Amino acid sequence: MFNPNNLDAKSMKNYVSSMGKKVEILFKSRALYVKKSNLPEAGLGLFALKSFTKGESLGPYNGKLLTMDQCKEEKYLPLWGHMLDMTNIDGIEPYVALHPSKTMILRFINHAPNMIDGKRLKLENRVNVEFSKIDVHPYIEIKALRDIPKDAEIYLNYGPGFSKMFLKNEKLRNFYLKSINK
């Protein structure tokens, strides 16, 4: 069985690229699995191993809580794009960010917009989960926004900055343009 703890993100991306068109599950949990994303040039993606119902938790978004001073440390600077802003959650001061754990399968959720150029995307290609506050560490979990069928890719909107960045990629932009509800 493939062990994600033995590969860093770059190695996993190279492993997926070397597989060509073959679809292979790289690793899985009881309810989720990771394989090549349906999104062009997105690398790996997270998929439902079972169906989820609207409001159901996919699990906690585990990671290390960081203070602002820790966030400024050289080892964390390249990881800013993977950190969650925790400043609006009461009771966790002095922490300001959550850096996802390398062993957490939920870190493979890809970003997706719900709309492009003011037009709504087809249901299967738009956001189907969201961050939800919980009262215990890690203070964040992932919940289904609607029913998610087995084998569907999981998509989350990480914010307008990610949409802007994603849509600069011509292949992703074209993928989403083809996915507009008509």
Image: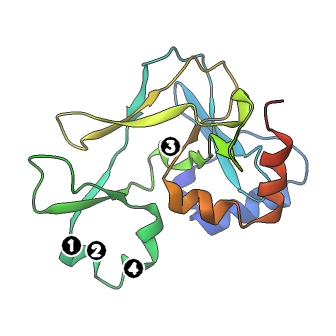
Which amino acid type is shown beneath numbered disc 4?
Leu
- Residue at 71% over, 50% down: 117
- Mark closer to the chain start, 4 or 3: 4
Sequence-wise, which precedes: disc 3 or disc 1? 1
In the rendered image, which quarter is residue 119 located in?
top right
Q: What SS does tag 1 mark?
A: helix
- Left or right: 23 as drawn, with respect to 12: right
Is residue 126 or residue 91 the one in the foreground? Answer: 126
Which dot, 4 or 3, sits closer to the camera?
Answer: 4
The amino acid type found where label 1 is placed reads Met
> Measured along the vertical axis of the image, is residue 66 above or below residue 45?
below
3 horizontally vs 143: left or right:
right
Gap between marks 1 and 4, in whole Å? 11 Å
Quarter of the N terminus within the rendering: top right
Mark 2 lies on a secondary structure that is: helix
User: Would you name the residue on which mark 1 appears?
Assistant: 68
User: Residue flagged by tag 2: what amino acid is it?
Assistant: Cys
Q: Earlier in the sequence, mark 1 or mark 4?
A: 1
Mark 1 nearby-residue class (10 Å; few <14, some 14–19, many ≥20): few
Residue at 71%, 56% in the rendered image: 42
Question: Which residue shows up at 88% across the image and 44% down it?
Answer: 22
Residue bearing the label numbered 3: 105
Q: Nearer the viewer, mark 3 or mark 1?
A: 1
Q: CA distance from mark 4 to mark 3?
A: 22 Å
Judge whether 38 appears above or below 59 on screen.
below
Indicate which label's residue lies in the foreground, 2 or 3.
2
Q: Please, which residue is most extreme toward the bottom here?
A: 74
